[in-house]
Image (spheres, grey):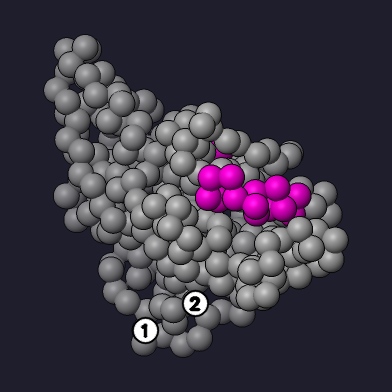
Amino acid sequence: MRRTPMAIVWPLVLVAALVSGCGLSSAGPPDPALLARPHGRCDPALAATVPAPVRERGSIGVAMVPHTPPMAYHAEDNATIVGLDRDMSQAIADVFCLTATPIPTSLDAIVPGLAAGRYDIVLASLSPTEERRKNADFVTYYNGGQGFLVRTGTTYPVRDYLDLCGRSVGVIIGSVQQGQLEQAAGVCARAGRPDWRLSLFPDGSASVLALRSSRIDVLYFSISLTKYVANTAPALFHLAGQYKRSLVAVGLAKNSPLTVPVHEAVRKLMADGTYRKILEKWSLRDNELDTAEILKGRS
């Protein structure tokens, strides 16, 4: 029988670290299955369209938030970043005949970092919202969504915002979920219910720890992270509900000369099967897109 991909690439030591807050520095080197990845095909013609400073450097700088498994997180050595976004960024760089250098950052620092030129592109489960598109370009590559994570044994369902009324809800600072709940303020009052209490966290690991220690009732974040935690630690956590689909995209500086080349690279990865292989490695085939689009906001 063929082994399921995630049985290989999500070792139990990672799950233990995520839910306990322990570091992984005392562990050994990363599992080779975490590092093995589908490679993109070098395209010299497309590589020639990449800005000269990036070509001369030989590497494309990629901002990532390494606390959001399975998209990006630290392997057993607590230093090497692995995940779907890491593999996807490397594959894009392959097409440009370059390497990809991950640059750890926080979600709320991403768009300012792009504007300041601290990295070339971003792969960090970014939703290309209208607000973000005012200050950045986007190339879609993933069909994401939101999930409501609760502790195992919780009896109430969480299907929509009304189910959050009267509860303590955790979100990540700068996430689309934070923006959605802030825009939805007043939903509970209009229904004659007490408001939810919003708690902000710097990353996925901190928010999961808060849920485990009962400091929050519900974690509202991307379906990729919430489903991952529920599947890998079912004795502790339960996916109470999914809420809406939303596109996930590569982020680039506004009017970046890399926007069109990245779009073409993602399209090539989709056409030659590399993109699908990356999704299958991380058991995320359900989130596949048929095509990539460039999304820009109105200037």
Quarter of the figure with the N terminus = bottom right
Find out whether residue 251 is within the magenta segment.
Answer: yes
Residue 44 pos. (x, y %): 84, 66
Give the class, few, some or many, for how many residues have Cα within 10 Å of label 2's Cα (few <14, many ≥20). Answer: some
- In the rendered structure, the answer to whether residue 188 lies left or right of residue 240 reads left
Residue placed most toward the observer, 256 or 123 = 256
Q: Which residue is the site of mark 2?
A: 80
**Residue drawn at x 47%, y 68% as measured from the top left:** 103
Find out whether residue 47 is within the magenta segment.
Answer: no
Which span is picked out in magenta? 246-265
**Separation of marks 1 and 2 at Cα, in angstroms:** 11 Å
- In the rendered structure, the answer to whether residue 90 lies left or right of residue 45 reads left
**Residue drawn at x 47%, y 55% as measured from the top left:** 114
The reply to whether residue 127 is in sight is no
The reply to whether residue 137 is in sight is yes
Instruction: Give the amino acid type for the residue marked by disc 1 in the picture.
Output: Ser
Q: Which residue is the site of mark 1?
A: 25
Location of residue 154 by image quarter: top left
**Residue drawn at x 19%, y 30% as measured from the top left:** 196
Residue placed most toward the observer, 117 or 6 = 117
Instruction: Give the amino acid type for the residue marked by disc 2 in the picture.
Output: Thr
